[in-house]
Image: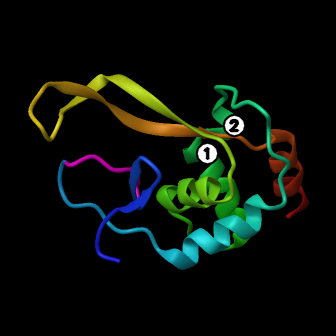
């Protein structure tokens, strides 16, 4: 892979959601599979609650600790999407980027919330 990965309406690079500004690293398939192995341990939530404990960044670090290897934020997001786990992008109104068609500025997706039970994550991390 030499560019972003498309999952449904999203383009995702190693840093997370991709926008057309600058070159971004591709997502490693083996990181996606490693993230899936860890995410499979957690119950899914019916709704995604805005909570720092299940934001892609902090959750990525917990998944890395459990997988005992590096996992990119993009790999975590792709793994969750491929598993049918709810992923809710978080838009940052303070950072705007010009759309490719030049019609105007759109908010940059800075992170996402992932629909897994945070108590399951906490228990797994404490057990390591």
Q: Nearer the viewer, residue 2 or 56?
A: 2
- Rendering quarter of residue 116: top right
**Residue at the image position 75 percent from the left and 64 percent from the top:** 38
Residue underneath mark 2: 53
Q: Using the image, determine if residue 105 lies above or below residue 121.
A: above
Residue 21 in magenta?
no
Tell me where residue 54 appears, x and y as whole percent. Answer: 67, 39
- What is the chief secondary structure element of the magenta stretch? loop
Q: CA distance from mark 2 to mark 1?
A: 6 Å
**First reached walking from the N terminus: tag 2 or tag 1:** 2
Does the stretch in magenta take in 19? yes
Residues rendered magenta in the picture: 15-20
In the image, residue 114 sits, relative to residue 108, either above or below, namely below
Q: In which image quadrant can residue 107 be found?
A: top left
Q: Position of residue 121 (x, y in %)?
A: 80, 49
Q: Are marks 2 and 1 in contact (CB under 8 Å)?
A: yes
Q: Quadrant of the C terminus?
A: bottom right
Residue farthest toward the top in the current orientation of the protein: 93
As helix, strand or loop, the secondary structure at mark 1 comes to: helix
How far from the left and from the top, in percent, is residue 63?
Answer: 68, 59
What is the number of the mark on residue 58? 1
């Amino acid at each position: 892979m030499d560019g972003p990965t498309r999952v449904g309406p999203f383009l995702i690079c190693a840093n997370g959601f991709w926008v057309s500004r600058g070159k971004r690293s591709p997502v490693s398939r083996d990181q996606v599979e490693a993230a899936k192995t860890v995410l499979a341990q957690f119950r899914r939530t019916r709704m995604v609650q805005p909570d720092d404990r299940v934001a892609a960044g902090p959750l990525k670090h917990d998944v890395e600790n459990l997988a005992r290897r590096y996992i990119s934020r993009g790999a975590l997001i792709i793994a969750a999407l491929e598993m049918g786990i709810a992923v809710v992008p978080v838009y940052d109104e303070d950072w705007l980027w010009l759309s490719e068609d030049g019609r105007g500025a759109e908010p940059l997706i800075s992170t996402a919330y992932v629909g897994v039970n945070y108590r399951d994550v906490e228990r797994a991390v404490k057990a390591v």
